[in-house]
Image (spheres, rainbow, N blue to C red):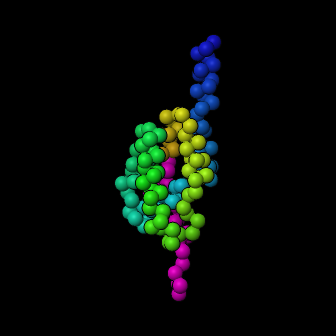
Amino acid sequence: MKKLINAKLQCLLVIHVEEIIRSQDVNIVARYLAAILEEETAYDIIDEIGRAKSMDDFMEGLRKAMRLSKKIQNEYIGVIPNSDNIKGVVALIGENEENLKFLTRYLASLAFAGWGIERMKKKKEGE
């Protein structure tokens, strides 16, 4: 009986892939990662996030990415995640390693795909 309850609880902890894909917080963070890749060629940071094997690894990569926000804030409109966006992404991971694995690779893939980040770039005068 105890094993059955534990198995059911484990199933509840796994977030459906669809929930991650539809998450506005994930989309905002992914767009930001695409922007820092475009402006700062931050391949190492995106790779670190994509390869994260633990929550600590993921958070360290995200911390490094967020340190670049000041460098791009004048280049893009509405692309920098706020603390609620980051909390939302972390909440989707929870305690489940499978969620971490999928989410980190998904974020990195979206960043490398570019996400049409040019549309969010601020127009310079005379353009």
Q: Residue placed at 62% from the left, 25% from the top?
A: 9
Asked if residue 116 is among those painted magenta in the image, a careful observer would answer: yes
Q: Residue placed at 51% from the left, 72% from the top?
A: 74
Frontmost residue, 31 versus 66 = 66
User: In the picture, residue 3 is in which quadrant?
Assistant: top right
- Most extreme residue toward the bottom is 126
Q: Residue placed at 60% from the left, 32% from the top?
A: 13
- Most extreme residue toward the top is 1
- For the N terminus, the image quarter is top right
Q: Does residue 19 appear in this view? A: yes
Asked if residue 23 is among those painted magenta in the image, a careful observer would answer: no
Q: Is residue 21 above or below residue 125?
A: above
Where does the image place residue 59, in percent across and percent down from the top left?
Answer: 46, 46
Where does the image place residue 123, in percent across and percent down from the top left?
Answer: 54, 78
Q: Is residue 119 above or below residue 101?
A: below
54 displayed left or right of 115 = left
Q: Is residue 61 above or below residue 14?
A: below
Where does the image place residue 19, in percent across and percent down from the top left?
Answer: 62, 44
Q: Is residue 50 above or below residue 116?
A: above
Give the mark count: 0
Q: Does residue 52 appear in this view? A: no
Q: Which residues are magenta?
A: 106-127
105 displayed left or right of 79 = left
Q: Residue placed at 49% from the left, 54% from the top?
A: 110
